Amino acid sequence: MDASALSNPQLQQMINQEKERAMATEMIAKLTSACWDKCITGTPGSKFSSSESSCLSNCAQRYMDMSIMIVKRFQSMH
C-alpha cells in the first residue's frame, strides 16, 4: 500500500471497522469456549437444562462485564 492509500479517511475507517469486527468475533469465540467448558458438563440434548441455560447466561454476562472493565481500564491509561 502506498502512503496516499493509508491517508484516505474512508479506507482508514474501513480498516478500523474490520479490526473491530475481528475483535468481536474473537471475543465471541473465547466466550463460547470458556462458558461451554464451564457450563456444559455432559452431552447436550435437544435443549439446555435450566441449570445449563442459567450458567451460560451468567457466564456470558460476567465475561462481558470483565471485557468492558478491561477496555475501560486500558482507555483510562492513555
Image: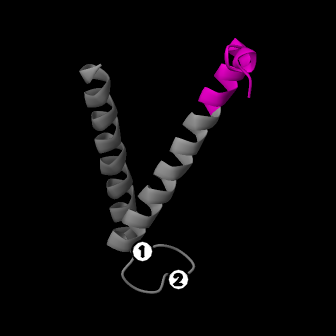
Residue at the image position 64 percent from the left and 35 percent from the top: 18
Cβ atoms at labels 2 and 1 below 8 Å apart? yes
Where is residue 63 shown, x and y percent of the image? Answer: 34, 50
Magenta segment boundaries in residue numbering: 1-17
Secondary element type, mark 1: loop
Q: Position of residue 61 (x, y in %)?
A: 35, 48
Residue 76 lies, with reference to residue 18, above or below; the image says above
- The quadrant of the image that shows the N terminus is top right
Q: Is residue 57 magenta?
A: no
Front residue of this view, candidates 30 and 6: 6
Q: Amino acid at mark 2?
A: Gly
Q: Is residue 61 left or right of residue 15?
A: left
> Disc 2 and disc 1: Cα gap in Å?
8 Å
Percent of width and height locating residue 35: 38, 64
Height in image: 75 above or below 51? above
Residue 2 sits inside the magenta stretch = yes
Crowding around mark 2 (Cα neighbors within 10 Å: few <14, some 14 to 19, many 20+) is: few
Query: What coloring was used for the rendering?
Result: one colour
Amino acid on which the number 1 mark rests in the picture = Ser
The residue depicted at 34 percent of the width and 32 percent of the height is: 71
- 64 in relation to 51, above or below: above
Rendered residue at 70%/18% (across/down)? 3
Q: Which residue is mark 1?
A: 49
Chief secondary structure of the magenta span? helix
Q: Horizontal and vertical percent for residue 7? A: 67, 13
Q: Residue at x 65, y 21 (%)?
A: 13
Q: Which mark is residue 45?
A: 2
Q: Which mark is residue 64?
A: none
Q: Residues within 10 Å of mark 1 (few under 14, many from 20)?
A: few
Locate residue 55 relative to residue 11 in the image: left or right: left
Quadrant of the rendered image containing residue 50: bottom left
Task: Determine the secondary structure under disc 2.
Answer: loop
